[in-house]
Image (cartoon, coloured by chain):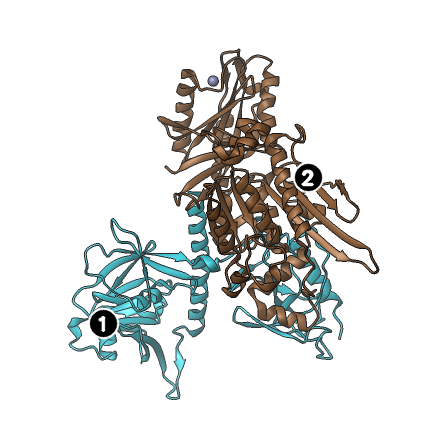
Chain colours: A cyan, B brown
Amino acid sequence: MKNIDANLNSMFFITLRVVQTISLMMAKEGIQPMNKHTGKMTFRVRIADENLNFKDHAFDDPKVLGRQLIEAAGGHPVDEHVAIAILPNGDFEDIRLDESYDLRGRGVEKVLVARSDRSFKFKIDDADLEWPRACISGFVLRKLAKLPPNYNLWQEIPGQHDKKITDTDVINLADAGVERFVSLIDQTTEGDALPSKDQTYLSGHGYEFEVVTEGVNTGIVLKGLPLPDGKYEHTAADVLILLPRGYPDCPPDMFYVAPKLTLAGTGQVPKACTVEHRFGGRVWQRWSRHNNAWRPGIDGLQTMVARVQTALAEAQA
Amino acid sequence: MRASDLILLGPHRSQIRSLLTAGAGSERSAYMLFGIADIEADPWTNQPRRRLVSHRFHAIGDDDLISASARHVTWQTDGFMRLLNEAKANGLIPALVHTHPKGHAKFSEQDNRNEAELARTAALKGMPGLISVVIAGNGDIAARIWAQADKAEGLGRILHVGPRLQISGLKGTPADFLDRQVRLFGKEATRQLSGFRCGVAGGGATGSALLPLLLRLGVQEAVQFDKDIIDETNLNRLHGGRRSDVDAKLPKTAIHTRTVEDSGLGMTLVSVDAWAGHPATWDALKACDVIFCCTDDHAGRLFLNRFARFYGIPVIDVGLAMQRRTGAAYDLFARVSTLVPGHPCLLCGGYLDPRRAREESMRRNDPDAYDRLKEEAYVLGEGDPSPAVVTFTTEAATMAVNEWLAGVTGLAGEAGMLPTRIRRFHARDERRPFVEPRPDCPCCNQAATLGRGDVYPFLDMVT
Ligand SMILES: [Zn+2]
Ligand SMILES: [Zn+2]
């Protein structure tokens, strides 16, 4: 029971992180008015066909009718098609043909248009989803589920063992009993959370942080750490500490900073900070500071944060 | 409901026993919390299994004791709700403990009625069960779990873990081939040895010597963890290894499986094709009653060092160091450490190097990053292969198994297993280094980690 809870927890944790990342991306791309050379404000919407191929479309008004969206995607005849808004959190919402839908109001930038007279409902984990056609591929299902690469999707088959879904599998949602898919983390690349003591320390001291896993590596990113006054050409930076397997019995080694820091005034790079390191989709400046004194049970992220702060305060060209 | 068994750790057993003294002839009661070790598929039966590991003892204050005699104990139960809340918040299972100073370790009708009521409350609070433990005046212990409010199931099998090791509730007769062993240790101790489910982490020199010893001692269920393929240079010490195995590139586990099968002695040996510590090994490790750590890597040791603490499953660690000093002098050491509650861990003993463990993990999991750091001279590096000779690796394996025998049979006295023995082959002697656990060491000295069972992240560490 506990184990299952723990797994669910981990899934929840990871899924949450992915959702956050996606909404972050959306906020950047967004549906902000674009100033085109005409000088007119337009609203960009990405409209997908049944295979989830997205194409950009522009509207002059953020309020569009369902039929306009279908027409824009070339759906004909219009009343045999359906438009579904994909909300920023991944939920779907039907747009009726003559409904005036405020894309901006709901933060919608993606719409699905497909030929259908009805849609098919199913669940992935506990999320309710629908699909405008009877057939769906494993690939599209995975896309809808927003599964990280280290997750597999399983189809629940009543009275039998669950079936693992591959990208090329085609599932008929109209079949009796096709109702639920369950995502499961792949055992070999288990995601990692933070040991409880560090969790307590970081939250207790008001640090904003994120646990990032890439392949087999786990890192913790401390966000917007203030830098010593006037020392660098930046006032704050993110700090990455890679946590080795076996942490907290095993010590972390160096730390990493983004953006790249240079000393104020001279613009010089601090000593032993020239190597770049790619992690979690960012480029980090490696601070090669080694200290292998480590007391398991006593030292933790608070030790590393102290080391980081000392290094940042003492850095010289 | 999945089958359950109990792991009762030495410090908790002492606290349960202390109720007998405190009661001085009349009944006493207390609460406990148990950690959960869920096994998705037991390596030998392939069935799900749940183990309950003693985590904490809660005394009931004198103020809460209402009345007690040799036949009853009545106490105020406000503390019970606090216990349930603590259990719920931490994913633990609550337990009741009481004594039968004059009677047997058997639950009475009165016990049934009282406990059913408490079990009902526990179920309402969302507990997966309520454990009940009773200790008789003679020290016998019985346990059961109320998974539903109206039905308790016996927890017949209890693994007692400390410097002495014992499994209560075992049935069956020792196999006939063990006759000469029965003549030394007796029937009961031999039944015990056969009943232990043994894990062997590492199938190299030491593991290959150790597994056949377990086989000859009558062990019926074992699981081995290794990922290596035999090579030419293993043949000087890998028991069971053949030249043809090298040509066939056989995994070491396949060689040991052949040894076990050819013997026809009834052992079921399961192989897990991974290094101890890999997620694929967790389930099988949790299913063991003792684990022999025969790996030569620091990362696996570091993992098992913590594992022993969280799951209360004894780990017997074997380490070897051999080198030739300048001139004619040698340094030849074999070390055996037993990781049970009360013994200092390998980190506190300085027997493993966390920095090496970090580098080994990186070499295994992220070889590119490892190579880059090696080029920059930021890692210690592997260096040349270390020397190894079969007589010493084999003797180290024997030392480890003998330590387990001392724990089960008491052959070296009531105190059971020693924390650490170091044999110096070059000096023909044996040392018993004194190690003090570091204050707050999570692997041997923190109450919060003892018998904690399943947590997320696994072992509260990065794995
Ligand atoms: Zn009783
Ligand atoms: Zn320790």
Determine crowd level at label 1: few under 14, some 14-19, many 20+ residues with C-alpha closer than 10 A.
many
**Which of the chains bears the disc numbered 2?**
B
Query: In screen coordinates, is A309 left or right of A241?
Result: right
Query: In screen coordinates, is B343 left or right of B110?
Result: right
Which of the image's four quarters has the C terminus of chain B? Answer: bottom right
Q: Secondary structure at mark 2?
A: loop
In the picture of the structure, the residue carrying the numbered disc 1 is: A114
Which of the image's four quarters has the N terminus of chain B? Answer: top left
Determine crowd level at label 2: few under 14, some 14-19, many 20+ residues with C-alpha closer than 10 A.
many
Which residue is located at x 17 percent, y 78 percent? A76
Query: In screen coordinates, is A303 left or right of B4?
Result: right
Q: In the rendered image, which quarter is residue A113 located in?
A: bottom left
x%, y% of residue B239? 58, 52
Which residue is located at x 37 percent, y 62 percent? A89
Q: Is residue B80 above or below residue A105?
A: above
Q: Is residue A14 above or below residue B127?
A: below
In the picture of the structure, the residue carrying the numbered disc 2 is: B419
Q: In the rendered image, which quarter is residue B445 located in?
A: top right
Q: How far apart are the two marked residues, 1 and 2, measured between alpha carbons?
A: 70 Å
Q: Which mark is residue A244?
A: none
Give, as a three-letter code, the residue at label 2: Pro
Q: Residue furthest right?
A: B327
x%, y% of residue B187? 53, 27
User: Between residues B10 and B450, which one lies in front from this camera angle?
Assistant: B10
Same chain for labels 1 and 2? Say yes or no.
no
